[in-house]
Amino acid sequence: GNSKGLRAGQLAIAIGNPLGFESTVTAGVVSATGRSLRARNGRLIDDVIQTDAALNPGNSGGALVDSRGQLIGINTAMIIGAQNICFSVASNTARIVLTDLIRHGRVRRARLGLAGAQVPLPRRIGHAIGTDQVSAVRILEVQADGPAERAGLLTNDIVFTIEGAIVSGVDDMVRLLDSNRIGAVVEIAFLRGGQVERRRITPVERL
C-alpha cells in the first residue's frame, strides 16, 4: 500500500506472534503519521506510523495493514507502560530499504541531522510559493552540530523541496537522501515565518 495516503483515524490491523502466540491479530486506528522515533542506540527512525493497535514483543517485523488488507507498515516498537502507543515503519520507507538490500546487500543513506513530521500546506501558501503540493515537512528537532544546524535550519521550519524535488512527507526525504547525496551539496527550500528561504547543505552518511 501507499503509506503517504494514510490519515489519522483510519483502521490499522497488526499481525504477528506476540509473546509466542502465533498469528495474532489486533486492531486500532492510525493515531499519527510521519513521526520520527529515536531508537535505543540514539539513531532516528524516520517516517513512522503511530497507532493504538496493541503490540507486544513478538509483533516486531509483522505486518500493519489497512481495512483493504494492503500493507501500510512494518511493526517496530511500543512504549512500555503507555496505553497502546505503538509504532510501525511506513511501507513507503520499507520499500526503499528493501530495494537497497536486494540490490546492494546493505543500506547507505544520507542524513541531514533533523527529525520532522508531515504537516498540511495551506493552499494559499502553496499558491504563493508556486506549488500545488498539499503537505510538507515541519522540522521538529535539529541535532547539535549536524548538517542541518550548520546550514542554519531551525525547528518549525517547513521544508517543501530538496534540489527542486517536492517534499510532501518524510518518506520523500528518505527517498531523496539516498547514497548519492552523501557528501554532495543540496539546496533545501523551506518556509520560515511565512517567507521562502533556501540553504545549501551537505548531507553526511547515516551511521
Image (tube, helix red, strand yellow):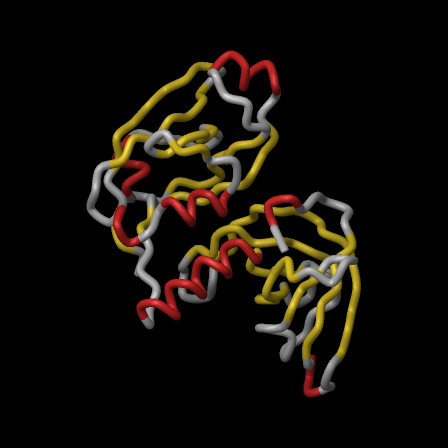
Examine the rendered structure and indicate whether residue 139 appears above or below residue 190: below
Residue sitting nearer the eye, 196 or 65: 65
Extreme residue toward the front, this view: 103
Residue at point 68%, 74% (across, down): 56
Residue sitting nearer the eye, 201 or 171: 171
Examine the rendered structure and indicate whether residue 7 appears above or below residue 18: above
State which quarter of the image contains the N terminus.
bottom right
Residue at point 41%, 26% (across, down): 190
Residue 105 falls in which quadrant of the image?
A: bottom left
Total residue callouts: 0
Residue at point 56%, 48% (across, down): 35
Residue 5 percent across, percent down from the top left: 65, 44
State which quarter of the image contains the C terminus.
bottom left
Residue 21 percent across, percent down from the top left: 73, 86
Residue sitting nearer the eye, 103 or 74: 103
Is 200 on the left or on the right of 156, as rendered?
left
Residue at point 70%, 43% (across, down): 7
Residue 130 percent across, percent down from the top left: 48, 16
Residue 135 falls in which quadrant of the image?
A: top right
Examine the rendered structure and indicate whether residue 23 appears above or below residue 7: below
Residue sitting nearer the eye, 70 or 143: 70
Residue 128 percent across, percent down from the top left: 51, 12
Is 30 on the left or on the right of 110, as rendered?
right
Residue 150 falls in which quadrant of the image?
A: top left
